[in-house]
Amino acid sequence: MSTPEKSDLTNTAATPAAGRSDDDWRRELTPEEYHVLRQAGTERPYTGEYWDTHTAGAYNCRACGTELFTSKEKFDSHCGWPSFWAPLAEERVRYIHDRTLGMERIEVRCANCDSHLGHVFEGEGYGTPTDQRYCINSISLKLVPAADDTQA
Ligand SMILES: [Zn+2]
């Protein structure tokens, strides 16, 4: 349904997620990736690959390769997970109200393949342009460093 307007050079390996079965995901993902992406698990804080990364580049969906976030919106929240104040574009992600822990949280998923990414929180006073924190599991993402890494 969504047609990306600009060509997505890093997205050549991506295939539409529709039609992928649970068995397909189990084959394609590591058990850790599967647990977070397909079972909405959460990696332990400060253990992920990207929570303290400052490399310039794009953060793609680990499952399908869609560009979801960029280093420009990444900020140091010190919460132990990669944090962004906005997605690359609103249509790249979808939101689901999650009440599993007795409080309302908003789950963030990849709009293309419906994989779990993390949660979004707002009004925490981080002083970012949106006052939102997309708290995303490192293991849900794949960093693609920018060709020119000098303006990080
Ligand atoms: Zn995806």
Image (cartoon, helix red, strand yellow):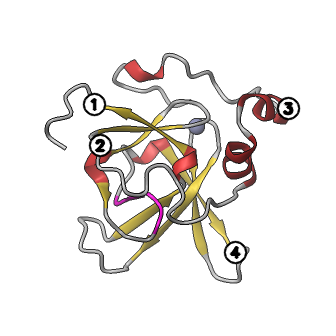
Confirm whether residue 150 shows in the render: yes
Mark 3, secondary structure of its residue: helix
Residue that appears at 14% across and 36% down? 150
Q: Label 3: which residue?
A: 23
Q: CA distance from mark 4 to mark 1?
A: 37 Å
Seen as rendered, the residue at the extreme bottom is 102
Q: What type is the residue that disc 3 sits on?
A: Asp
Are dots 4 and 1 in contact, CB under 8 Å?
A: no
Q: Position of residue 10 (x, y in %)?
A: 41, 22
**Would you identify the image quadrant in which residue 125 lies?**
bottom left
Q: Earlier in the sequence, mark 2 or mark 4?
A: 2
Q: Label 2: which residue?
A: 55
Q: Residues within 10 Å of mark 3 (few under 14, many from 20)?
A: few
Q: Position of residue 113 (x, y in %)?
A: 63, 37
Mark 1, secondary structure of its residue: loop
**Would you identify the image quadrant in which residue 79 lies?**
bottom left
Question: Which label sits in the foreground, 4 or 3?
Answer: 3
Q: Label 1: which residue?
A: 146
Q: What type is the residue that disc 1 sits on?
A: Ala
Q: CA distance from mark 3 to mark 1?
A: 33 Å
Tell whether position 81 is magenta. yes
Are dots 4 and 3 in contact, CB under 8 Å?
A: no
Residue that appears at 37% across and 19% down? 7
- Is residue 12 toward the left or the right of residue 64 in the image? left
Are dots 2 and 1 in contact, CB under 8 Å?
A: yes
Q: What type is the residue that disc 4 sits on?
A: Arg
Compared with residue 141, is residue 130 higher up or lower down, i.e. above or below?
Answer: below
